[in-house]
Image (spheres, rainbow, N blue to C red):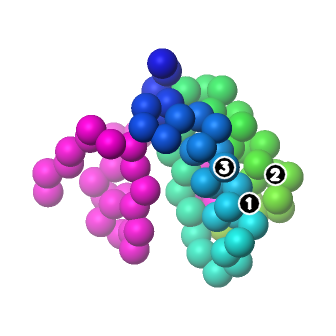
Amino acid sequence: MQDGEFGLGKSKTYDLLHTLANDFDNIQVVAISGRNEKMKRSFEYLVEKEHRKDSIKVIDYTTKIPELMSISDLVITKPGRTYYF
């Protein structure tokens, strides 16, 4: 397995982002692909296809997870990861 494939799996993660892009007009999303370049490209393709560049930001590996979580209203993440604040 590669980064981003634990828990939900690649296709389920993509499907979830697709649902967020299609079913919710009034939200902002930060989709983090980690070090998985293939996932990043698929996220970017989806954002382009759905014309959501203004509301969905795709980023790769970051050390800013605690900061991103603290400004979020909802966090969807893979299991097995614990963050302490």
Q: Residue at image x 71%, y 72%?
A: 23
Q: What range of the chain is rendered magenta?
A: 56-85
Left or right side of 1 for 68: left
CB atoms of marks 2 and 1 within 8 Å: yes
Q: Magenta region's main secondary structure?
A: loop
Q: Residue at image x 75%, y 66%?
A: 22
User: Which residue bears the numbered disc 1?
Assistant: 53
Q: Residue at image x 75%, y 53%?
A: 47
Q: Nearer the viewer, mark 2 or mark 3?
A: 3
- Foreground residue, 36 or 10? 10
Magenta-colored stretch includes residue 73: yes
Q: Secondary structure at mark 1?
A: loop
CB atoms of marks 2 and 3 within 8 Å: no
At label 1, which amino acid type do we have?
Lys
The disc at residue 15 is 3
Q: Position of residue 55 (x, y in %)?
A: 66, 67
At label 2, which amino acid type do we have?
Glu
Viewport quadrant of the C terminus? bottom left
Q: Earlier in the sequence, mark 3 or mark 1?
A: 3
Badge 3 crowding class, 10 Å Cα cut-off, few under 14, some 14 to 19, many 20 or more, is few
Q: Is residue 5 visible?
A: yes
Q: Residue at image x 49%, y 33%?
A: 4
The disc at residue 48 is 2
Q: Compute the Cα span from label 2 to label 3.
A: 15 Å
Q: Secondary structure at mark 3?
A: helix
Q: Position of residue 20 (x, y in %)?
A: 64, 64
Q: Compute the Cα span from label 3 to label 1.
A: 18 Å
- Foreground residue, 8 or 60? 8
CB atoms of marks 3 and 1 within 8 Å: no
Q: Is residue 54 visible?
A: no
52 versus 73 height, above or below: above
Badge 1 crowding class, 10 Å Cα cut-off, few under 14, some 14 to 19, many 20 or more, is few
